Amino acid sequence: MLTVSDLSVARGGLPVLSGVSFALQAGEALILRGPNGSGKTTLLRSIAGLQPPLSGTIEGTDRIAYAGHQDGIKTALSVEENLGFWASVFGTGKIEAALEGFDLLGLKSRLAGNLSAGQKRRLGLARLLVTGRPVWVLDEPTVSLDAASVALFAGAVKTHLAGGGAALMATHIDLGLPEARSLDVTPFKARPEELGADEAFL
Ligand SMILES: Nc1ncnc2c1ncn2[C@@H]1O[C@H](COP(=O)(O)OP(=O)(O)OP(=O)(O)O)[C@@H](O)[C@H]1O
Protein backbone atom coordinates (compact mmCIF):
# COMPACT_ATOMS: atom_id res chain seq x y z
CA MET A 1 0.00 0.00 0.00
CA LEU A 2 2.81 2.37 0.93
CA THR A 3 6.53 1.78 0.55
CA VAL A 4 9.10 4.25 1.81
CA SER A 5 12.70 3.56 0.81
CA ASP A 6 15.83 5.22 2.14
CA LEU A 7 14.03 8.52 2.65
CA SER A 8 15.84 11.65 3.80
CA VAL A 9 13.81 14.71 4.75
CA ALA A 10 14.59 18.32 5.72
CA ARG A 11 12.75 21.22 7.36
CA GLY A 12 13.69 24.86 7.04
CA GLY A 13 16.70 23.94 4.91
CA LEU A 14 18.20 21.60 7.52
CA PRO A 15 18.24 17.81 7.29
CA VAL A 16 16.03 16.18 9.93
CA LEU A 17 15.90 12.43 9.21
CA SER A 18 17.81 10.19 6.84
CA GLY A 19 17.64 6.57 5.72
CA VAL A 20 14.02 5.89 6.72
CA SER A 21 12.53 2.76 5.14
CA PHE A 22 9.32 0.85 5.86
CA ALA A 23 6.39 -0.76 4.08
CA LEU A 24 2.76 -0.71 5.05
CA GLN A 25 0.43 -3.48 3.88
CA ALA A 26 -3.36 -3.55 3.77
CA GLY A 27 -4.75 -3.90 7.29
CA GLU A 28 -1.61 -2.57 8.98
CA ALA A 29 -1.03 0.45 11.21
CA LEU A 30 2.35 2.00 11.94
CA ILE A 31 2.80 4.52 14.73
CA LEU A 32 5.72 6.94 14.59
CA ARG A 33 7.37 7.57 17.93
CA GLY A 34 10.02 10.01 19.02
CA PRO A 35 10.41 13.06 21.25
CA ASN A 36 9.26 16.58 20.32
CA GLY A 37 11.22 17.92 17.39
CA SER A 38 12.54 14.52 16.32
CA GLY A 39 11.06 14.80 12.82
CA LYS A 40 7.73 12.93 12.81
CA THR A 41 5.78 15.82 11.27
CA THR A 42 8.52 16.46 8.73
CA LEU A 43 8.44 12.80 7.70
CA LEU A 44 4.64 12.71 7.43
CA ARG A 45 4.52 15.98 5.44
CA SER A 46 7.08 14.59 3.01
CA ILE A 47 5.20 11.31 2.61
CA ALA A 48 1.94 13.23 2.06
CA GLY A 49 3.58 15.24 -0.72
CA LEU A 50 3.53 18.64 1.04
CA GLN A 51 7.29 18.98 0.72
CA PRO A 52 9.83 17.17 -1.45
CA PRO A 53 12.18 14.71 0.26
CA LEU A 54 15.94 15.29 -0.01
CA SER A 55 16.36 11.77 -1.39
CA GLY A 56 14.73 8.36 -1.41
CA THR A 57 11.43 7.14 -2.81
CA ILE A 58 7.80 6.90 -1.74
CA GLU A 59 5.48 4.50 -3.56
CA GLY A 60 1.73 4.69 -3.09
CA THR A 61 1.28 8.46 -2.72
CA ASP A 62 -1.90 8.37 -4.81
CA ARG A 63 -3.51 6.19 -2.12
CA ILE A 64 -2.94 8.67 0.71
CA ALA A 65 -5.44 10.78 2.64
CA TYR A 66 -3.56 13.18 4.95
CA ALA A 67 -4.78 14.86 8.13
CA GLY A 68 -2.20 17.22 9.59
CA HIS A 69 -2.11 19.70 12.45
CA GLN A 70 -4.64 21.94 10.70
CA ASP A 71 -8.14 20.53 10.46
CA GLY A 72 -8.44 21.38 6.76
CA ILE A 73 -11.99 22.63 7.10
CA LYS A 74 -13.77 25.46 5.32
CA THR A 75 -15.09 27.74 8.08
CA ALA A 76 -17.79 29.41 5.92
CA LEU A 77 -19.41 26.07 5.03
CA SER A 78 -21.57 23.89 7.27
CA VAL A 79 -20.36 20.53 8.54
CA GLU A 80 -22.47 18.78 5.92
CA GLU A 81 -21.22 21.08 3.13
CA ASN A 82 -17.61 20.53 4.16
CA LEU A 83 -17.95 16.77 3.86
CA GLY A 84 -19.98 17.12 0.66
CA PHE A 85 -17.21 19.27 -0.80
CA TRP A 86 -14.54 16.69 -0.05
CA ALA A 87 -16.77 13.85 -1.24
CA SER A 88 -17.14 15.61 -4.58
CA VAL A 89 -13.40 16.35 -4.82
CA PHE A 90 -12.63 12.66 -4.29
CA GLY A 91 -15.62 11.48 -6.32
CA THR A 92 -17.13 9.38 -3.55
CA GLY A 93 -20.44 11.17 -2.92
CA LYS A 94 -21.40 9.54 0.40
CA ILE A 95 -21.14 11.47 3.66
CA GLU A 96 -23.64 9.75 5.97
CA ALA A 97 -21.15 7.20 7.34
CA ALA A 98 -18.64 9.97 8.03
CA LEU A 99 -21.24 12.09 9.86
CA GLU A 100 -22.33 9.09 11.91
CA GLY A 101 -18.83 7.71 12.51
CA PHE A 102 -17.61 10.94 14.08
CA ASP A 103 -20.82 11.83 15.91
CA LEU A 104 -21.55 14.82 13.68
CA LEU A 105 -25.18 14.15 12.74
CA GLY A 106 -26.46 16.63 15.34
CA LEU A 107 -24.04 19.26 14.06
CA LYS A 108 -24.45 18.81 10.34
CA SER A 109 -26.06 22.23 9.70
CA ARG A 110 -23.64 24.13 11.98
CA LEU A 111 -21.09 26.43 10.33
CA ALA A 112 -17.71 24.74 10.64
CA GLY A 113 -16.19 28.01 11.84
CA ASN A 114 -18.49 27.93 14.85
CA LEU A 115 -17.50 24.46 16.03
CA SER A 116 -15.45 23.87 19.18
CA ALA A 117 -11.84 22.77 18.77
CA GLY A 118 -12.68 19.12 19.39
CA GLN A 119 -15.68 19.25 17.04
CA LYS A 120 -13.47 20.79 14.33
CA ARG A 121 -11.00 17.98 14.82
CA ARG A 122 -13.79 15.40 14.51
CA LEU A 123 -14.85 17.04 11.23
CA GLY A 124 -11.25 17.07 10.00
CA LEU A 125 -10.98 13.36 10.74
CA ALA A 126 -14.41 12.57 9.25
CA ARG A 127 -12.99 13.96 6.02
CA LEU A 128 -10.79 10.84 5.85
CA LEU A 129 -13.85 8.63 5.51
CA VAL A 130 -15.23 10.52 2.51
CA THR A 131 -11.95 10.45 0.57
CA GLY A 132 -12.21 6.73 -0.09
CA ARG A 133 -8.40 6.66 0.07
CA PRO A 134 -6.96 3.52 1.67
CA VAL A 135 -3.83 4.91 3.34
CA TRP A 136 -4.47 7.34 6.18
CA VAL A 137 -1.49 9.52 7.11
CA LEU A 138 -2.24 11.28 10.37
CA ASP A 139 -0.29 13.78 12.43
CA GLU A 140 -1.36 13.93 16.09
CA PRO A 141 -4.97 13.06 15.17
CA THR A 142 -6.27 13.10 18.75
CA VAL A 143 -5.28 16.68 19.66
CA SER A 144 -8.32 18.48 21.21
CA LEU A 145 -10.35 15.25 21.39
CA ASP A 146 -12.01 14.17 24.64
CA ALA A 147 -11.89 10.53 25.78
CA ALA A 148 -15.14 9.62 24.01
CA SER A 149 -13.93 11.14 20.74
CA VAL A 150 -10.55 9.40 21.01
CA ALA A 151 -12.48 6.14 21.33
CA LEU A 152 -14.57 7.05 18.24
CA PHE A 153 -11.40 7.77 16.32
CA ALA A 154 -9.71 4.53 17.44
CA GLY A 155 -12.84 2.65 16.36
CA ALA A 156 -12.75 4.35 12.94
CA VAL A 157 -9.11 3.32 12.50
CA LYS A 158 -9.90 -0.29 13.47
CA THR A 159 -12.81 -0.40 10.99
CA HIS A 160 -10.58 1.12 8.31
CA LEU A 161 -7.88 -1.51 8.89
CA ALA A 162 -10.43 -4.34 8.98
CA GLY A 163 -11.72 -3.10 5.61
CA GLY A 164 -8.27 -3.45 4.04
CA GLY A 165 -7.03 0.09 4.70
CA ALA A 166 -3.76 1.12 6.31
CA ALA A 167 -2.73 3.91 8.67
CA LEU A 168 0.51 5.74 9.37
CA MET A 169 0.38 8.17 12.27
CA ALA A 170 2.33 10.18 14.78
CA THR A 171 0.77 10.21 18.21
CA HIS A 172 1.98 10.58 21.77
CA ILE A 173 -1.02 8.78 23.27
CA ASP A 174 -1.95 5.11 23.46
CA LEU A 175 -4.82 4.54 21.04
CA GLY A 176 -5.47 1.00 22.18
CA LEU A 177 -4.41 -0.54 18.88
CA PRO A 178 -2.40 -3.57 20.02
CA GLU A 179 -1.98 -4.73 16.43
CA ALA A 180 -0.16 -1.51 15.44
CA ARG A 181 3.60 -1.60 14.90
CA SER A 182 5.68 1.34 15.98
CA LEU A 183 8.72 2.99 14.49
CA ASP A 184 10.98 5.19 16.62
CA VAL A 185 12.42 7.88 14.35
CA THR A 186 15.20 8.81 16.81
CA PRO A 187 17.86 6.52 15.28
CA PHE A 188 17.28 8.15 11.89
CA LYS A 189 18.29 11.62 13.05
CA ALA A 190 20.25 13.23 10.22
CA ARG A 191 23.73 14.61 10.65
CA PRO A 192 23.97 18.30 9.63
CA GLU A 193 26.80 17.55 7.22
CA GLU A 194 24.35 15.51 5.10
CA LEU A 195 23.36 18.79 3.50
CA GLY A 196 25.99 20.94 1.80
CA ALA A 197 27.65 23.38 4.22
CA ASP A 198 26.47 26.37 2.17
CA GLU A 199 22.84 25.21 2.25
CA ALA A 200 22.94 24.68 6.02
CA PHE A 201 23.36 28.42 6.49
CA LEU A 202 20.54 29.48 4.13
N1 LIG B 1 8.57 25.53 9.67
C1 LIG B 1 9.75 25.15 10.13
N2 LIG B 1 10.88 25.77 9.75
C2 LIG B 1 12.08 25.39 10.20
N3 LIG B 1 12.27 24.36 11.05
C3 LIG B 1 11.18 23.70 11.46
C4 LIG B 1 9.87 24.05 11.03
N4 LIG B 1 8.99 23.20 11.61
C5 LIG B 1 9.71 22.38 12.38
N5 LIG B 1 11.03 22.66 12.29
C6 LIG B 1 12.13 21.96 12.97
O1 LIG B 1 12.28 20.69 12.35
C7 LIG B 1 12.61 19.70 13.32
C8 LIG B 1 11.61 18.56 13.25
O2 LIG B 1 10.34 19.05 13.65
P1 LIG B 1 9.02 18.17 13.52
O3 LIG B 1 7.86 19.11 13.63
O4 LIG B 1 9.11 17.32 12.30
O5 LIG B 1 9.14 17.23 14.82
P2 LIG B 1 8.06 16.29 15.52
O6 LIG B 1 8.75 14.99 15.83
O7 LIG B 1 6.83 16.20 14.70
O8 LIG B 1 7.77 17.07 16.87
P3 LIG B 1 6.48 17.11 17.85
O9 LIG B 1 6.43 15.79 18.57
O10 LIG B 1 6.81 18.27 18.78
O11 LIG B 1 5.26 17.38 17.00
C9 LIG B 1 12.63 20.42 14.68
O12 LIG B 1 13.97 20.72 14.98
C10 LIG B 1 11.85 21.68 14.43
O13 LIG B 1 12.29 22.74 15.26
Image (cartoon, grey):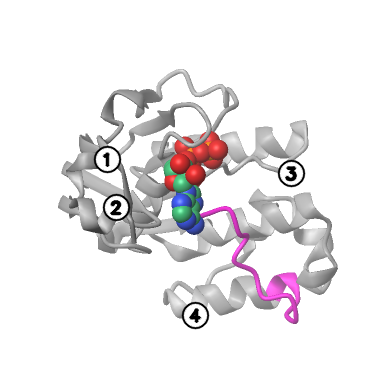
Q: Earlier in the sequence, mark 2 or mark 3?
A: 3
Quick check: 131 left or right of 71?
left
Q: Amino acid at mark 4?
A: Ser
What residue span does the magenta drawing correspond to?
68-80
The Cα atoms of the two marked residues, 2 and 4, are separated by 42 Å
Q: Nearer the viewer, mark 2 or mark 4?
A: 2
The quadrant the C terminus occupies is bottom left
Residue at screen point 59% across, 66% down: 72
Can residue 57 be seen from the camera position used here?
no
Q: Earlier in the sequence, mark 3 or mark 4?
A: 4
Give the answer, above or below, for where 170 lies relative to 172. below
The Cα atoms of the two marked residues, 2 and 3, are separated by 35 Å
Q: Nearer the viewer, mark 3 or mark 4?
A: 3
Element under disc 2: helix
Element under disc 1: helix
Q: Identify which residue, 171 or 128, lies in the foreground.
A: 171
Q: Verify CB contact (< 8 Å) between mark 2 and mark 1.
A: yes
Give the answer, above or below, for where 70 lies relative to 80. above
Q: Earlier in the sequence, mark 4 or mark 1?
A: 4
Q: Which residue is mark 2?
A: 200
Q: Which residue is mark 1?
A: 192
Residue at screen point 70% across, 72% down: 80
What number is the disc on residue 144?
A: 3
Q: Amino acid at mark 3?
A: Ser
Q: Position of residue 187 (x, y in %)?
A: 29, 23
Q: Which residue is mark 4?
A: 88
Residue at screen point 61% across, 40% down: 153
Residue reaching furthest top?
178
- Residue 98, by quadrant, is bottom right
The Cα atoms of the two marked residues, 4 and 1, are separated by 44 Å
Q: Earlier in the sequence, mark 3 or mark 1?
A: 3
Q: Verify CB contact (< 8 Å) between mark 2 and mark 4.
A: no
